[in-house]
Image (cartoon, rainbow, N blue to C red):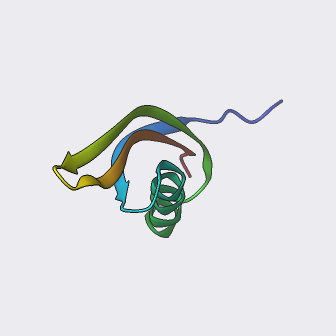
Amino acid sequence: MTETRVARVTEVIAGSPISFDEAIKSCYERAKKTLRNITGMRILEFRINCDDTGIREYRIRAEIIFILD
């Protein structure tokens, strides 16, 4: 008989002053400090925080998918 797996999805927001790529990497690095068995991420949204001087922060909203113990 095959083992049944159950996953959970949690939504997070991360930001970086450098790039969207850095925001995604920091999101993953921070999530893996708290969550075990991460199997994937889905990026839901890209945003920027800006003012008259330009882009201040690149932000992403992501779902982290992980298998429950």
Q: Residue furthest right?
A: 1
Q: Residue sitting at 21 percent across and 56 percent down?
A: 53
Percent x, y of residue 24: 50, 52
The image quarter containing residue 5 is top right
> In the rendered view, would you say 67 is above or below 53?
above
Q: Residue sitting at 24 percent across and 47 percent down?
A: 49
State the residue in front, 2 or 68: 68
Q: Residue furthest left?
A: 52
Q: Residue sitting at 81 percent across and 31 percent down?
A: 2
Left or right position of 66 against 16: right
Say how many tags the image has: 0
Quarter the N terminus occupies: top right
Q: Residue furthest front?
A: 53
State the residue in front, 41 or 47: 47
Percent x, y of residue 47: 33, 38
State the residue in front, 1 or 40: 40
State the residue in front, 43 or 4: 43
> In the rendered view, would you say 46 is above or below 18?
above
The image quarter containing residue 48 is top left
Left or right position of 33 against 11: right
